[in-house]
Structures are given as structure tokens and as C-alpha cells.
Image: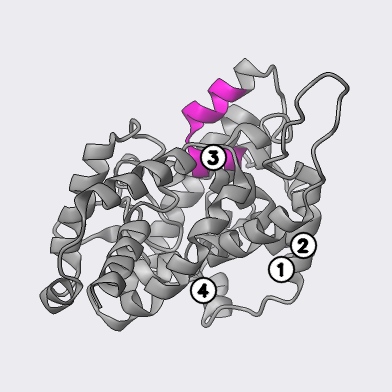
Amino acid sequence: MRCLHNIIFLGIITVIIICGPPSIAQNDQMSLDDIMQTGEQWLQENIDPDVLNLLGSMDGAKARKFLADFQQWLHSECVVDVTSIKETAVVVLPLLERYEESWPYAVWLKTRLDYLEMAQQFKQTLPPPLKIPGEVSKPVFYPEPEVERKVWRKKIESKSLPKGAEAYVDRLKPIFAAQRVPDKLVWIAEVESSFVPYARSPAGAAGLFQLMPQTAKTYGLSSWPRDERLQPEKNAKAAARYLKYLHKEFKDWPLTLAAYNAGEGRVRSLMGRYKAVSFDGIATHLPVETQMYVPKIEATLLRREGITLSQLAAPDS
């Protein structure tokens, strides 16, 4: 029984830190001690005490080893490594859905299960290492951007609309249009939150478009005493303004979306390092989620609106 408790405990810790770097793009990388402390605090604040009592204690050394391995993946460019946590995420999801306190985090996690499924698929389809005489062959850890686009399009082709999506799209398109941003980009909310306005990331993002607190504050939203990010119209307006700001710098929707997910500083740095002028030029150097986030959004736009990112107009001044 204790073994089961340990597995569930690790699962909750996984939820706490999964996909952390893209979601906390404005923050510095957290140390292992920081992650452990943050995880324990989150558990105390958000999980029912009865659940914590059920979980019991566990070997701290094992937890730290797990977190160390996981942190290494979080900051890597290796998409296929994520497959090792898929089973844990699937196990912990029903637990998070069961409790009111953790339900917003379950919504957030559920929208990202696609990444785990796709990573597993990429692992099975990646080509074998290229053999060069006299050199040690290196395995391929990520698919090329064009391959990702094709696979994501196939994946999203059969994806049904999230509940309530159409109603939200009708409400939010005028808000994007008023900010002179292509109104079709409201479908970002499907990828971010499945159109659930109360979705929350363990890293602190919230709402339909998963705005971090500082970003929300920059664009006029208050988080206290009431979190305005949970109000769909206000969240959408701030997201549209942020997208417009990012596009002004990057002049390109794939790069803009990469910056929205991974942080403008990271995208800017990678473009300079690799002398790149496009998303494809830096895609395989971006964090795991961002590598899949941009093609997933494009596939969603193609499915819902019959349009690609390259066909979207630039924001009007």
C-alpha cells in the first residue's frame, strides 16, 4: 500500500512541475530545492488534508531523484523523453478532478495530455541515427518542424470541439478584432485551457489564455481581491494586446506564439544564437512544450477555421 501512496505522491508532484519552464517564462530557472519547497507548499494549499493523510510519507531521496531527472527534462529540447511520465499523468488526473481545490489544475493538465501522446508517437516514428564512418551515431531526440506540423494536423483532424467552445468563440472574436488582432486567434484558448475559464497552471497562469500574473498586470488585470484573469472577456483582451505586442517585435505569427509560450527573451536569444529568422530555425532548440505548442495551434486553426498561421494578417497599428 505504501508503494501505491508513493506513486500517487510522485504523480501530484509531476502535475506541480510538468511543463514548468514554458509557463514561467519570465522567471529564472528554479533550483531543485525551490521546486521541492514549491511543490510541498502547493500541496498544502490546494489538496484536501484527507488526501495528504492518505498519501502518507515517502523516501525523500527518491523524491529528489525523481525531481532531478524531471527538471533535466523540463529544460531540455528532447521531446521523446516526456513519454516516461505519461502513465503517471494519466493516473493522477482523476485524483485532481475529484477535488474542488485541484479541479482547475486538472483542467490544465488534461489539455496537455495531447503532448504526452504525441511525444510517444514521435518516439516510435523518429528515424534511426545516421551512421557516419568513424563516428559514434547520435540518436534523434526530436522531430523536424515540418514532421510535427503534419502529425499535429492529422491528430487535430478528429478532435471534437470542447464543450462551450462555440459560444466563447462568438463572444471573444469581437474582443480580438477590437484590438486589431486576427480574431481567429481566439482558438489559442482551445490549446491553452479547452475554453475552461477557471483553468490554472501550477506555475501560476490562469484563465482561457493562461496569462501569468505579471503579464496580466502589465495589461491592466488585477489578481486581488478578485482574479480578473478568470473573467473570459478581460482575459481575452489582455491576451490579444500581448499577442499584438509580441508580433510587433517578431513580425511573424509562429515566432510570436513561441514567445507567448516560452517567453520573448528566450526566443530573442535563440534567434540571435542560431542566426535564425523563423520558427523552424529555432524550433528544435525551444523547450519541449513550445516545440509542440506552435504546430498544435496551427493545426487547430486549420481544423476550426481552415486557415494556416502564414495566412493570418499582421495586427493593424
Tell me whether the residue at label 1 lies in contact with that at label 2, contact meaning CB atoms closer than 8 angstroms: yes
Q: Is residue 88 left or right of residue 86?
A: left
Work out whether mark 4 precedes mark 1 in sequence or the reverse, and give the earlier one: 1
Q: Quadrant of residue 93?
A: bottom left
Query: Looking at the image, which is closer to me, 136 or 106?
Result: 136
Q: Which mark is residue 168?
A: 4
Q: Which mark is residue 156?
A: 1
Secondary structure beneath label 1 = helix
Q: Is residue 258 visible?
A: yes
Against 31, residue 6 (above or below) is below
Work out whether mark 4 precedes mark 2 in sequence or the reverse, and give the earlier one: 2
| Disc 2 residue crowd, few under 14, some 14–19, many 20+, Cα 10 Å | some
Question: Which residues, given as a range, are shown in magenta?
Answer: 256-270
**Tag in front: 3 or 4:** 3
Q: Main secondary structure of the magenta part?
A: helix
**Tag in front: 4 or 2:** 2
Residue 27, given in percent of the width and then of the height, sits at 33, 34
| Distance in Å between CA atoms under marks 1 and 2 | 5 Å
Query: Looking at the image, which is closer to me, 141 or 260?
Result: 141
Q: Residue at x 48, y 27 (%)?
A: 265
The residue under label 2 is 153
Against 263, residue 152 (above or below) is below
Q: Is residue 124 left or right of residue 80?
A: right
The residue under label 3 is 287
Work out whether mark 1 precedes mark 3 in sequence or the reverse, and give the earlier one: 1
As shown in the figure, which amino acid type bears the numbered disc 3? Pro
| Disc 1 residue crowd, few under 14, some 14–19, many 20+, Cα 10 Å | some
As shown in the figure, which amino acid type bears the numbered disc 2? Arg
Residue 96, given in percent of the width and then of the height, sits at 32, 74
Tell me whether the residue at label 4 lies in contact with that at label 1, contact meaning CB atoms closer than 8 angstroms: no
